[in-house]
């Protein structure tokens, strides 16, 4: 079953990906878009929750477990309503992406991102999420 999940997540068609994730035990909301070549840990798909209105960019990797020399750890990943995960970002196990938060492309996220914040860089730093329109008004 893992090979089927990994194969479908590489495809461009969104509907079959969402149906297969749900069938594998993932909780997936409405109006979710998962781009091509996304990798979601096939060993524990039941540990991921993706709420409504989420966009996951191309090449994103979401890990739900890890092995260390003396231990095995697994953790739930929750992506809250309206969050955006930029292309090629890495999301570690046990992480919660808050409502309306943005993970910048290429960011490596190993801790929670609060609602309405921006995670950028490797390792990810948490920054305020500013609205581009407000910045333009202030500089005009």
Image (tube, rainbow, N blue to C red):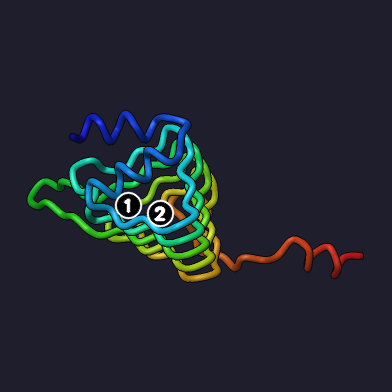
Q: Nearer the viewer, residue 49 or 59?
A: 49
> In terms of sequence position, does the residue under pointer 2 or pointer 1 come before the other?
1
- In whole angstroms, how far apart are the C-alphas of marks 2 and 1? 6 Å
| Residue topped by disc 2 | 109
Label 1: element kind: loop
Residue 87 higher or lower than 91, as above or below? above
* Residue under the image location 74 percent in, 61 percent down: 132
| Residue topped by disc 1 | 92
Expressed as whole percent of the image width and height from the top left, the position of residue 52 reads 46, 61
From the image, which quarter does the N terminus lie in? top left
Expressed as whole percent of the image width and height from the top left, the position of residue 139 reads 87, 65
Residue 135 higher or lower than 90, as above or below? below
Expressed as whole percent of the image width and height from the top left, the position of residue 111 reads 36, 62
* Residue under the image location 23 percent in, 29 percent down: 3
Q: Nearer the viewer, residue 118 or 60?
A: 60
Labelled pair 2, 1 in contact (Cβ < 8 Å): yes
């Amino acid at each position: 079953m893992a090979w089927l999940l990994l194969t479908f997540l590489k495809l461009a068609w969104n509907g079959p990906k969402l149906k297969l994730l749900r069938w594998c035990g993932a909780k997936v909301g409405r109006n979710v878009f998962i781009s091509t070549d996304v990798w979601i840990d096939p060993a524990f798909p039941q540990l991921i929750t993706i709420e409504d209105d989420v966009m996951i960019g191309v090449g994103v990797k979401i890990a739900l477990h890890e092995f260390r020399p003396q231990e095995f750890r697994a953790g739930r990943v929750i992506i809250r309503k309206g969050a955006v995960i930029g292309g090629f970002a890495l999301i570690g196990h046990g992480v919660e992406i808050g409502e309306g938060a943005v993970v910048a492309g290429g960011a490596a996220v190993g801790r929670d991102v609060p609602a309405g914040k921006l995670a950028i860089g490797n390792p990810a730093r948490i920054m305020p999420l500013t609205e581009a329109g407000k910045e333009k008004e202030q500089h005009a």
